[in-house]
Image (cartoon, rainbow, N blue to C red):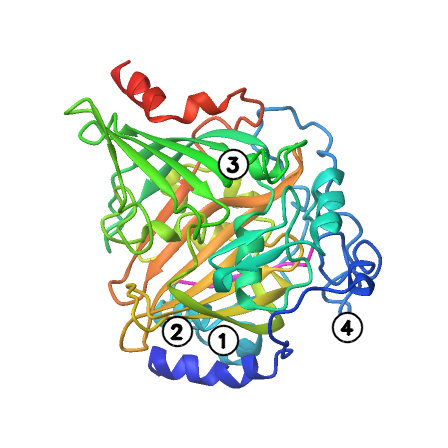
């Protein structure tokens, strides 16, 4: 069975998803549902019909006993037993709840499997994010067909989305802590499993979500991002700085690169869209970082609806500091023994390239968690309309914040038989959510000073 045929098999399943109307602001009656029959971020609060997806009761808001700040987060669901294991041999039985990408992975690799566990709706956020979401739910608007938004700050702008691009903006503006610093690895194993670890030191200053912000004080910024390469030696010292904007029609993303060889800072207009990601061996695009980032202007976004699907979720075992990178990075795909999948409701958004624009991916289908607006999976198609790359966002609730975010992103190239894993943190210190920074730390001048040191 070809990958293209697999996609066709699932087309009817997606077609039965809830059809939604064209763009429209939500009514006061709809907004009143937030925090009542809907969760504060707009998900269905109730369980599904057969109880396989439980009701949302607030997520995880306190760390489990024994947790200490700085720990890799202990698994609150370590005692769960596997409900079912999906392999290439039985995948057709579960096809209605599998993405075309997962079905293709199962068919392509005899060694790949999906262990499905009981569903836990663990996503939780600070009360101020819930309050802000309700506050902006009737003021947020897309501009220029969705290339930017206005009327929103701190909260999820479109908790009851009516269009596909609104779902994507919910992902772009979701809460990921106020500030965070992390050390992570990126690896692109060969087909035999050999790899060189590229090590990054990242900083996120997510100004959009910070308490007390107004749309005016944001100065049209969502976040400031800095990434320094610290290994291997041949790449070490390069630093990337990005200013991400809220209204990308008014002001596109700005980016700069510090080159250690030249000791110079230069503008980097190509850090966007389908330009190669840093040290990625051409295995991911710039806009695949964080599952999707940047301007949505090269695609037409269609909201297919909401669907129950098996997706990566509560991947605390994969996050554990008891694992070594060699335990995770196996030939052809990451080690499925450490992966956890659960049944969740996801928003399905189909993106097709606009006439007159270009991108490596002619079409992309996004599967977005209803509870967190985190993209959990993406299927990417080439210009021949064949499934090319499958992305998975293995996520956990960082309950010390609290918020729901990836612990590892994996982008698998079905045609090359290789994959890229980014966000490996098992052998490094845990994320630091208590860093203190100001906006002057994210200027080209600051980048130059840091590079010279």
Looking at marks 1 and 4 on the same chain, the residue that comes earlier in the sequence is marked by 4
Q: Position of residue 327 (x, y in %)?
A: 40, 43
Nearer the observer: mark 4 or 2; the answer is 4
Percent coordinates x, y for residue 414 in the rendering: 31, 66
Mark 3 and mark 2 lie on one chain; the one further toward the N terminus is 2
- Disc 1 crowd rating (10 Å Cα; few below 14, some 14-19, many 20+) is many
Q: Is residue 332 left or right of residue 104?
A: left
Q: Which mark is residue 219?
A: 3
Q: Earlier in the sequence, mark 1 or mark 2?
A: 1
Element carrying mark 3: loop
Residue at 63%, 34% (x, y): give it: 213
- Residue matched to label 4: 50
User: Can you say whether 150 is above or below 33 in the image?
Assistant: above
Instruction: Determine whether 67 is above or below 419 in the image.
Output: above
Query: Picture quarter containing residue 139?
Result: bottom right
- Distance, label 3 to label 2, CA atoms, is 48 Å
Residue 123 visible here: yes
Q: Are marks 1 and 2 in contact (CB under 8 Å)?
A: yes
Q: Secondary structure at mark 4?
A: loop
The residue wearing badge 2 is 107
Mark carried by residue 91: 1
Q: Categorize mark 3 by other alpha carbons within 10 Å: few (<14), some (14-19), many (20+).
A: few
Q: CA distance from mark 1 to mark 3?
A: 49 Å
Q: Position of residue 377 (x, y in %)?
A: 49, 60
Q: How far is mark 4 from mark 2, CA to CA?
A: 29 Å
SS for dot 2:
helix
* Circle 1/circle 3 CB separation < 8 Å: no
Q: Which residues are magenta?
A: 112-121
Q: Residue at x 55, y 36 (%)?
A: 218
């Amino acid at each position: 069975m070809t990958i293209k045929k697999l996609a066709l098999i699932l087309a009817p399943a997606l077609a039965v998803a809830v059809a939604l109307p064209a763009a429209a602001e939500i009514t006061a009656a709809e907004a009143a549902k937030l925090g009542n029959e809907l969760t504060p971020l707009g998900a269905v609060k109730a369980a599904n019909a057969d109880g396989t997806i439980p009701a949302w009761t607030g997520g995880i808001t306190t760390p489990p006993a024994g947790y200490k700040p700085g720990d890799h987060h202990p698994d609150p669901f370590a005692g769960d037993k596997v409900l079912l294991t999906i392999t290439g041999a039985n995948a057709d039985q579960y096809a209605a709840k599998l993405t075309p990408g997962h079905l293709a992975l199962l068919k392509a690799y005899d060694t790949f499997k999906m262990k499905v566990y009981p569903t836990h709706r663990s996503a939780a956020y600070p009360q101020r994010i819930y309050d802000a979401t309700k506050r902006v739910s009737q003021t947020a608007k897309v501009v220029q067909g969705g290339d930017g938004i206005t009327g929103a700050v701190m909260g999820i702008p479109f908790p009851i989305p009516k269009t596909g691009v609104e779902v994507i903006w919910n992902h772009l503006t979701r809460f990921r802590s106020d500030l965070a610093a992390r050390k992570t690895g990126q690896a692109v194993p060969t087909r035999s499993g050999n790899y060189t670890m590229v090590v990054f030191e990242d900083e996120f200053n997510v100004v959009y979500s910070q308490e007390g912000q107004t749309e005016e004080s944001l100065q049209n910024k969502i976040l400031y991002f800095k990434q320094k390469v610290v290994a291997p030696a041949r790449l070490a010292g390069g630093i990337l700085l990005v200013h991400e904007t809220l209204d990308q029609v008014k002001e596109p993303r700005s980016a700069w690169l510090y080159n250690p060889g030249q000791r110079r800072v230069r503008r980097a207009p190509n850090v966007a869209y389908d330009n190669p990601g840093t040290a990625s061996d051409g295995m991911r695009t710039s806009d695949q970082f964080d599952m999707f980032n940047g301007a949505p202007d090269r695609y037409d976004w269609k909201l297919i609806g909401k669907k129950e699907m098996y997706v990566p979720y509560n991947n605390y075992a994969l996050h554990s500091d008891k694992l070594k990178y060699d335990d995770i990075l196996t030939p052809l795909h990451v080690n499925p023994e450490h992966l956890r999948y659960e049944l969740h409701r996801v928003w399905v958004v189909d993106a097709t390239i606009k006439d007159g624009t270009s991108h490596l991916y002619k079409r992309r289908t996004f599967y977005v968690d209803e509870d967190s607006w985190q993209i959990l999976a993406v299927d990417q198609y080439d210009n021949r309309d064949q499934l090319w790359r499958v992305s998975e966002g293995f996520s956990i609730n960082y309950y010390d914040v609290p918020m729901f975010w990836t612990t590892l992103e994996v982008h698998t190239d079905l045609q090359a038989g290789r994959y890229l894993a980014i966000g490996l943190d098992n052998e490094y210190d845990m994320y630091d959510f208590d860093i203190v920074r100001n906006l002057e730390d994210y200027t080209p001048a600051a980048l130059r000073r840091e590079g010279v040191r």
